[in-house]
Image (cartoon, rainbow, N blue to C red):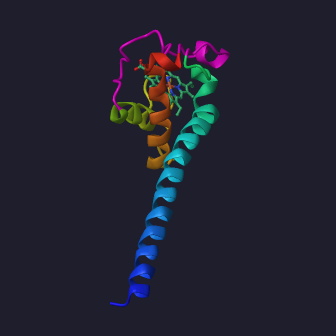
């Protein structure tokens, strides 16, 4: 093989790899932003931006304090949190049909931050 051709192939592989890397990184941070935006739009009215449930609507439906009431009654894994978001529980309405599975996962992932003392 000619050296020039080899170099071209090498360059191509490098550039393709770099583009893939950028896409993966930006889509990962994109879903994090999406989770936060969804939380603020659909959950914070009850749970509060800080997760304490200390809002007018939150008090009306007796929203648990996600920081203080541990462990969470409905589970603390990503799947369990996604399930309660999807199906609802007690006075919390389910998001099934209104949020896609990807959106449910994104907002569930964001909600799990309230379990981490560093975010409290
Ligand atoms: C209308 C008010 C309301 C909205 C909106 C709401 N919740 Fe809730 N949430 C509640 C209430 C009330 C409970 C307690 C349910 C029960 O156990 O009876 C709860 C429970 C939870 C729990 C489980 C806590 C535990 O101790 O097990 C999680 C996690 C949660 N909500 C996350 C969310 C997320 C994420 C959203 C947005 C997609 C959301 N909630 C939207 C009122 C609300």
Front one among 14 and 4: 4
Direction front: furthest residue: 3
**Image quarter for residue 108?**
top left
How far across and down, in percent of the image, does residue 93 sit?
Answer: 51, 31
**Image vertical order of residue 5 relative to residue 79, above or below:** below
Front one among 83 and 89: 83
**Image vertical order of residue 1 relative to residue 26, above or below:** below
How far across and down, in percent of the image, does residue 7 sit?
Answer: 42, 79
Q: Does the magenta stretch include residue 96?
A: no
Q: Does the magenta stretch include residue 72?
A: yes
Q: Is 56 on the left or on the right of 22, as rendered?
A: right
**Image vertical order of residue 84 relative to residue 59, above or below:** below
Rendered residue at 59%/17% (across/down)? 58
How far across and down, in percent of the image, does residue 22 sit?
Answer: 51, 57
**Image vertical order of residue 43 relative to residue 102, above or below:** above
- Magenta region: 52-77
Q: Is 79 on the left or on the right of 27, as rendered?
A: left
Rendered residue at 57%/43% (across/down)? 34
Rendered residue at 47%/55% (across/down)? 24
How far across and down, in percent of the image, does residue 44 sit?
Answer: 61, 26
Direction bottom: furthest residue: 2
Front one among 82 and 78: 78
Direction right: furthest residue: 56
Q: Quadrant of the N terminus?
A: bottom left
Rendered residue at 57%/16% (across/down)? 53
**Image quarter for residue 77?**
top left
Residue 98 seen from this side: no
Residue 78 seen from this side: yes
Secondary structure character of the magenta stretch overall: loop
């Amino acid at each position: 093989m000619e050296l020039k051709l080899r170099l071209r192939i090498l360059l191509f592989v490098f550039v393709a790899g770099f583009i893939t890397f950028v896409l993966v990184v930006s889509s990962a941070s994109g879903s994090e932003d999406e989770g936060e935006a969804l939380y603020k739009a659909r959950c914070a009215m009850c749970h509060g931006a800080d997760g304490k449930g200390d809002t007018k609507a939150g008090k009306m439906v007796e929203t648990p304090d996600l920081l203080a009431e541990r462990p969470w009654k409905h589970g603390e894994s990503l799947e369990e949190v996604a399930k309660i978001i999807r199906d609802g529980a007690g006075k919390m309405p389910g998001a099934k049909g209104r949020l896609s599975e990807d959106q449910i996962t994104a907002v569930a992932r964001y909600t799990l931050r309230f379990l981490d003392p560093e975010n409290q």
